[in-house]
Amino acid sequence: MRNIVQVVLLTLLLIGSVNYSSNAENNKKQYEHQIIKTYEEDVTGDGLKEIVELKGVLFSPDSKYYRDIVAVITSSENHVWEIPYMGGYDPKLTFIDLNHDKVNDIFFQSPTGGSGGLYQYHLHTLVQNKLLEIPLPEQPFVKGKFLENFKLEITISPNTEPTIINIEKRANEYIRLGIYNKEGKLLKETSAMVDPIAFFEPKLISKSKGYGLKSYQQVSGAYHADQIGTVESLWYFDRDKWILLQTKWMPSN
């Protein structure tokens, strides 16, 4: 009887050990980088294609959110570079010459998943085996403020006249929030909400000039869902800096 008990206990211990090892192995796999996509592109300018692996760690097995995203670039001579990124959804790389040195740069984008529809972006160059990040353009000029009689003033450039928008159709909401009284008198100075640039997309400027970037920046009224319109800007990288070629205001429907 004693021998039977010992055998049963030993069996249970072995089963527990196997289960523990299996769980540990599964947990290890869960936190390992997995390849999201593999690209072949010449990003060093040597005329040979590098292997570029975009990797990430899924937040959970049933999630589409990747954390610890990284691009691993391997040359034909087995030189390896890594570019770490923050977490996001549906990450992808685009290879395009944005600094106009005749070699494709590495343009990363991924939605952050927030309510503002923001993306994270990074731009890197690896010419002559030197990995450098190129800062993306920022739009410092966009401002907005409420005016008397249910109007909103939007300034998109220091060189253009402000745009005046009639917001009377939203009067009841602004009265409720205490921005105006019923006669349209402004009760307190209130600025519009200006988001950072939410989205970039490469745009062909011309065959001779090559590509630039188009940016989209949302402007809201009293709160984020109170969308007033979008500032669209066109940028071109020249002599180590971004030049603003064009800015226009696009009102929301």
Image: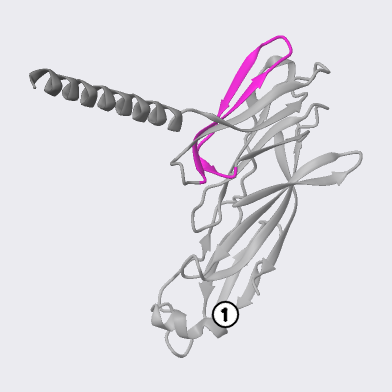
Residue 30 visible to the viewer: yes
Q: How many marks?
A: 1
Of the pair 185 and 32, the residue shown nearer to us: 32
Q: Quadrant of residue 238?
A: top right
Q: Is residue 67 above or below residue 249?
A: above
Q: Nearer the viewer, residue 209 or 97?
A: 97
Q: Residue at x 8, y 19 (%)?
A: 2
Q: Extreme right residue here?
A: 208
Check disc 1 and give the amino acid type.
Answer: Ile
Quarter that holds the N terminus: top left
Label 1 packing within 10 angstroms: few (<14), some (14-19), many (20+): some
Q: Position of residue 44 (x, y in %)?
A: 75, 20
Res. 185 in view = no
In the rendered image, the vertical position of residue 189 relative to residue 64, given as above or below: below
Q: Residue at x 56, y 69 (%)?
A: 227
Residue positioned 30% across, 27% down in the render: 20
Residue 75 coordinates in the image, percent (x, y): 71, 15
Residue 71 belongs to magenta span: yes
Which residue in the rendered view is the most extreme toward the top?
77
Residue 207: x percent and y percent?
91, 41
Magenta-drawn stretch, dominant element (helix, strand or loop): strand
Of residues 198 and 244, the one nearer the viewer is 198
SS under mark 1:
loop
Name which quarter of the figure residue 17 lies in. top left
User: Which residue of the protein is positioned furthest toward the left in this rendering?
Assistant: 2
Identify the residue at horizontal 34%, vertical 24% (top origin): 21
> Quadrant location of the C terminus?
bottom right
- Magenta segment: 64-90
Is residue 159 shown left or right of residue 121? right
Read off the residue under disc 1. 167
Q: Is residue 29 left or right of residue 202?
A: left
The answer to whether 157 is drawn above or below residue 15 in the figure is below
